[in-house]
Amino acid sequence: MSITEDDWADLEIPQAARGRSTRRLHPESTNDLYIAVTHPGLRRMLVLTGDATAAEGVARSLSRLAQTAGLELRLNAVSRHEYELQVLLTADELREVFSPLVADIAAASCDAPTTSAALVAAVERYERWQHLLRSVGKDGLGAETRRGLFGELLVLCDCLLPSLTDVEAVNAWTGPTGTNQDFQLPSVAIEAKTSTAKTMNRIRIASERQLDRTGTPALLLAVVSLDERRGGSGESLNALVDRTREHLTSVAARVRLDGLLIHAGYLPGHRDHYAEPRYTLRDLRFWNVRDGFPRLVESDLPSGVDECSYQLNTASLDDYLLTADEVTNLIRGAHG
């Protein structure tokens, strides 16, 4: 479920009396979750209700949380038996971040089996957002992360959007949410790597799960080779973000894309940092990670080894290389 500015605007219609306007989220859920706006202050918030036992279970966690400028997480007693966990927006500079944050916390809490579990899930997800906001420095994303985001957006814009509906394509981009592969469709997953090296021979695989086909009928490895420089005729990260948005006619897809960009650390307040450098596509290749493809997966690791990263030499992988038409057919076949 996405939350848009229109959703907030409906709640911000002036009221004669003090109080707040609310709208329930995930009405099918047994947990009570609401977005709300206070009157007359027009403060936006997410509200989760719970009993005293559920509140007690998260009270200690809240006391240990660090402060985050622009956001507040608090536990309020409504009565002796009813409590509210509130996520509040306290600074306008995070307005564009707040909607996807709220939607994400609500999604993490709605399916929890108990109220206590829902409140715990909300606090844990709030902490993840705190970590995200702290990890993106005042100058925005680091150089390697910017390149990686550019490469994923290029695959989304140039490979998925021409083959799928807006909503299908944007929903397939799952990398910003921490999935094993960057793109996941019912019949194919795609792991995207981006490089500015002169050759594409060596690709770093970050974990034993990135090239693991478990749970997907087909897995592709995409490698985006870029030329990076300041100035010139290349495309900046901002320009690619704008081009991707322009391809989307669905409001739901645009809202989803904006939320995923924030998940990836592309924060609206940092846009000025991404006018440079500019990138020019040198090459884009796809390999089919099928039987015989050289890789390490979880089942290969010896007992006592929990995780690994490794370098993949692509120089001898011609037998697994796919044509553009084959890639398109696999992507379309996921919904065919």
Image (cartoon, grey):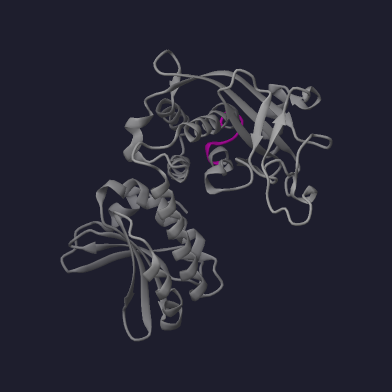
Is residue 282 positioned above or below 111 on the image?
Answer: above
The extreme left residue here reads 16
Q: Quadrant of residue 190?
A: top right
Indicate yes or no whether the magenta region holds residue 120: no
Q: In the depicted view, which residue is nearer to us: 2 or 28?
A: 2
Is residue 222 positioned above or below 259 on the image?
Answer: above
x then y, percent, for residue 253? 48, 41
Is residue 214 positioned above or below 38 on the image?
Answer: above
Residue at 33%, 60% in the rendered image: 67
x then y, percent, for residue 192? 61, 34
Give the residues in magenta: 161-167
Q: Is residue 41 left or right of residue 255?
A: left
x then y, percent, for residue 41? 19, 60
Residue at 25%, 52% in the rendered image: 91
Residue at 44%, 31% in the rendered image: 241
Magenta: main secondary structure? loop
Residue at 17%, 69% in the rendered image: 17
Q: In the depicted view, which residue is nearer to us: 294 or 190?
A: 294
Q: Is residue 263 left or right of residue 72?
A: right
x then y, percent, for residue 336? 70, 38
The extreme top residue here reads 232
